[in-house]
Image (cartoon, rainbow, N blue to C red):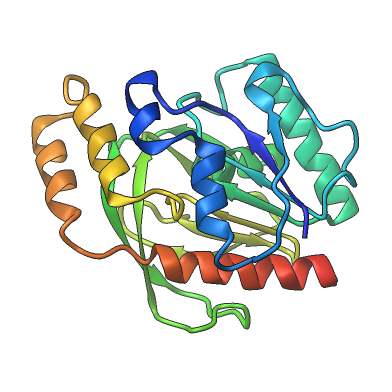
């Protein structure tokens, strides 16, 4: 399977040597569940949009420090690419910024949440069970780092997991699009370093809670397995 990584940001220079860049994180995360997959990189943040929608079997939109409403030309171009993928029913996975961008591209609304930063481990309930959720569990707890949230769903969206803090946490669109607000590709060490790097801009109580939450194990391996099952089904459909 060939999965095009649509890279929307770089890891901060101060963290790059210890944790690698985002494509490397996704490669380490996805290879155990999709052995043999090819992962070509398209640097969307530099304007490197794919020439066509069929260059890869599936696509993945990464996280980003940018917001989907920032008005940058590459963000608008990526929205157009997502709409083309949807029109052709080609498989797409969105993570964090990617989760929000898919919603915006298909007619939903994304805003800076009045609830503030989501950091550390987020705790969510699975509210819709799908066949690709193997093995199944009724909760999905993933590492997060975001301010923006999807607040209005596109008509095609089906919410699969939710929490009071982030009601639209895991979304499926038809049989070909899947997006999640959390970061299954993050490890605890990187998440901790990211919070500490942003210490001056994070509310102190939220930072303490976020750091304390890292003592609970994330469901990253479970979510990556679900992603592997979903993409395999979507590509073979």
Q: Is residue 63 above or below residue 226?
A: above
Q: Is residue 216 above or below residue 11?
A: below
Taking the image as shown, residue 131 lies to the left or right of residue 124, namely: right
Q: Is residue 221 above or below residue 73?
A: below
Taking the image as shown, residue 113 lies to the left or right of residue 198, namely: right
Taking the image as shown, residue 64 lies to the left or right of residue 41, namely: left
Q: Quadrant of the N terminus?
A: bottom right
Taking the image as shown, residue 195 lies to the left or right of residue 220, namely: left
| Image quadrant where residue 124 sits | bottom left
Q: Quadrant of the C terminus?
A: bottom right
Q: Is residue 210 above or below residue 158?
A: above
Is 34 or 206 nearer to us in this picture?
Answer: 34
Is 136 or 205 nearer to us in this picture?
Answer: 136
Name the residue: 90% across, 52% down: 88
Name the residue: 54% across, 82% down: 134
Q: Is residue 45 visible?
A: yes
| Image quadrant where residue 175 sits | bottom right
- Residue 112 lies, in percent from the top left, at 41, 30
Name the residue: 45% across, 71% down: 222
């Amino acid at each position: 399977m060939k999965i095009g990584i649509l890279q929307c940001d770089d890891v901060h220079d101060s963290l790059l040597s210890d944790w690698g860049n985002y494509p490397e994180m996704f490669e380490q995360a996805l290879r155990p569940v999709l052995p043999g997959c090819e992962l070509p990189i398209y640097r969307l943040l530099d304007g490197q949009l794919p020439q066509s929608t069929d260059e890869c079997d599936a696509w993945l939109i990464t996280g980003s420090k940018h917001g989907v409403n920032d008005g940058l030309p590459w963000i608008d171009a990526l929205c157009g690419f997502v709409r083309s993928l949807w029109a052709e029913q080609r498989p797409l996975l969105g993570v964090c910024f990617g989760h929000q961008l898919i919603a915006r591209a298909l007619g939903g609304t994304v805003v800076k949440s009045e609830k503030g930063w989501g950091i550390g481990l987020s705790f969510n309930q699975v509210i819709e069970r799908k066949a690709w959720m193997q093995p199944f569990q009724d909760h999905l707890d993933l590492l997060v780092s975001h301010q923006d949230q999807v607040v209005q769903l596109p008509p095609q969206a089906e919410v699969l997991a939710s929490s009071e803090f982030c009601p639209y946490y895991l979304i499926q669109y038809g049989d070909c699009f899947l997006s999640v607000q959390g970061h299954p590709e993050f490890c605890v060490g990187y998440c901790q370093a990211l919070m500490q790097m942003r210490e001056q801009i994070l509310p102190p109580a939220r930072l303490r809670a976020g750091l304390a939450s890292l003592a609970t194990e994330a469901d990253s391996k479970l979510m990556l397995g679900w992603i592997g099952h979903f993409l395999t089904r979507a590509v073979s459909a």
